[in-house]
Amino acid sequence: MRLVIGSDHAGWMLKGAVVAHVRALGHEVIDVGSFDEKPVDFPDIAREVARKVTSGEADRGLMVCGTGVGASIAANKMKGIRAAVCHDVHSAHQCVEHDDVNVMCVGAQIVGPWLANDLITAYLAAEFSTDADFRRRVDKLHAMDAGG
C-alpha cells in the first residue's frame, strides 16, 4: 500500500516513528512534512495529505498532530476525504471497516510510539466491509460530499 504521511510541528517527532513502522510493514511512504519543530499550519499539511489520497497517488493517509483533532477537521474539509481521529485500536480498524476512512489522524500529545504503531497496524490491515448497511451509509456520505 502507498501511504501519504503528514504532521505539524507538534507531531513531527512521532511522525519519524510512524514512517519507520509503516516502512517496516512493507508499505511505501510519501512524506509531505513537516520536517522539523518549526511551527507550521496543520491545514496546509492536511490539504497535501488529502490531495495525495484523492488524486490516487496514495491509497490512504496518516496525519500526526498534537491531538489529531485539528488535522481531522482540516482533512474532512476536502472533498472525497473521510478522516477520523483514532486513539484506540478498535476505532483504528472499525473506522475503515464501517466508514471507509481514508485518513487516520493521531495525536502525538495523546499517544506514544508503541500505541501509534498498534493503531497504524490495525488501520492498514482493515478493509471496508462488504455489508450492505455499511456500503449504503458510505454512499450517503458520498452524496453529502457531492453537495446533497
Image (cartoon, grey):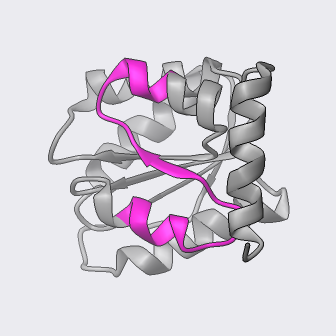
- Image location (x, y in percent) of residue 41: 35, 81
- Image location (x, y in percent) of residue 61: 60, 49
Note whether 78 is above or below 126 in the view shown.
below
Quadrant containing the N terminus in the rendered view: top right
Q: Residues in magenta?
A: 71-93
Q: Is residue 128 visible?
A: no
Q: Residue furthest left?
A: 109
Q: Is residue 48 visible?
A: yes
In depth, the one of 64 and 99 nearer the eye is 99
Residue 77 part of the magenta-drawn span = yes
In depth, the one of 140 and 44 nearer the eye is 140
Note whether 17 is above or below 71 in the view shown.
above
* Count of numbered circles on the image: 0
Quadrant containing the C terminus in the rendered view: bottom right
- Image location (x, y in percent) of residue 141: 68, 54
In depth, the one of 95 and 4 nearer the eye is 95
Note whether 64 is above or below 18 in the view shown.
below
Which residue appears at 73% of the width and 21% of the height? 129
Q: Quadrant of residue 119?
A: top left
Which residue appears at 24% of the width and 68% of the height? 37
Which residue appears at 62% of the width and 73% of the height? 78
Residue 40 part of the magenta-drawn span = no
- Image location (x, y in percent) of residue 53: 72, 57
